Amino acid sequence: MLILKNEEEIELLRENNLLVSKTLGELAKHIQPGITTLELDKIAEEFIRDHGAVPGFLGYDGFPNSICASVNSEVVHGFPSSYVLKDGDIISIDCGTLYKGFYGDSAYTFPVGNVKQDVLDLLQHTKEALELGVKNAIDGKRIGDIGYAIQSYVENFGYSVVREMVGHGLGRDMHEEPEVPNYGRRGSGIKLRENMVICIEPMINLGTKYIEQDSNGWTIKTRDNKPSAHFEYAVAVKKNEPDVLTTFKYIDEVLSKNN
C-alpha cells in the first residue's frame, strides 16, 4: 500500500535522515587503511545511540549489525567483520536509523586511500546518476522517469545497472511501496504523488550487471568480481522540485580535508 506522509511526518523523516547523514560523516573520519569494517560498525552504533536514536538496520529482518559494509565487488548487504581495509579498496556503507517511529536510510561509497582512476570514475558517475534520478522525483512524473535518468546516464560510460536490487518507499517501515528501480522507460510505472517519500539508490557495476548471493544469505556480489558503487538519498516528492531529506555535506567536508 502506498503511504503518503503529512508535513509533520516528513519532518520526522528529515530528522532521521539528517542523523544518518551525520553518522556517515562521522564514519568518513575513520575510513582509512588499517581499520576493520566491524570497528566502523561499532562507531556508527555508538554515534546513533548517542544522538537518541536506534540503529535502523540492527535486527531488521535478522540483519546482525548497525551498518552494511560492502567492500569492492560486494554490491549491498555486506556484513561488518574483521576484514581490514586496504589501500585501494572501496567500501559502500548503507546506514539506517529509527527515531520517533520513523526510519532514516542512506548509503555512500567511500574510496580507501589511493584508488584506481577507473574505480574513482565509477563512484563519481554513480553519484551523479543519483542526482539525475532525484530531479525526477516530482509530482506527476513516473517511477520509470527516475530509472531512465539513472540507467541512460551510467550506460553511457559502459557501466551496468543491478536489476534485482532497487530503491523503495520510506516511513514507519524501512521498506514501503513503491519499489524504485534504477532502470526503466520514460513515462512508465506508477505516477509519483506529492508527499511520497522514496529512497533512490543506484547500484552500479563496473562490469556485468549480474550478481550472486553470498553463502551468508545476505551479501550481494558482482558475478565478475569487479567493483560496484552505491549511493542513496531519501527524497520527498513535491510539486515543483524534490525535497531531498539526506545530505552528503558532512562526508564532503571530511573528504575535502583529506585531499
Image (tube, helix red, strand yellow):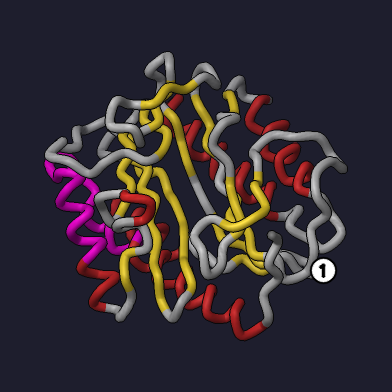
How far across and down, in percent of the image, does residue 160 sit?
58, 24
Indicate the quadrant where residue 89 lies.
top left
The image position of residue 79, as x and y in percent, is 26, 41
> Relative to residue 215, is residue 153 drawn left or right?
right
Image location of residue 150, percent across then percent down: 67, 39
Q: What residue is at 52 percent from the left and 19 percent from the top?
A: 210
Q: Residue at x 45, y 72 (%)?
A: 16
**Is the magenta region chiefly helix, strand or loop?**
helix
Q: Looking at the rendering, which quadrant does residue 90 occupy?
A: top left
What residue would you read off at disc 1? 240
Q: Residues within 10 Å of mark 1 (few under 14, many from 20)?
A: few
Work out which quarter of the rendered image holds the N terminus and state it. bottom right
Foreground pick, 254 / 69: 69
Q: Which residues are magenta?
A: 24-45
Q: Residue at x 73, y 55 (%)?
A: 135
Q: Is residue 118 above or below residue 113?
A: above
Q: Position of residue 253 (x, y in %)?
A: 38, 62
Residue 28 visible in the snapshot: no
| Residue drawn 40% across the image and 70% down it | 98
| Vertical relation: 194 (above or below) 50 | above
Asked if residue 191 lies left or right of residue 98, the reply is right
Q: Is residue 44 one of those drawn in magenta?
A: yes
Q: Is residue 104 above or below residue 36?
A: below
Which structural element holds mark 1? loop
Query: What is the three-letter code of the residue carrying label 1?
Result: Asn
Residue 91 in sight from this viewpoint:
yes
Q: Residue furthest bottom?
A: 8
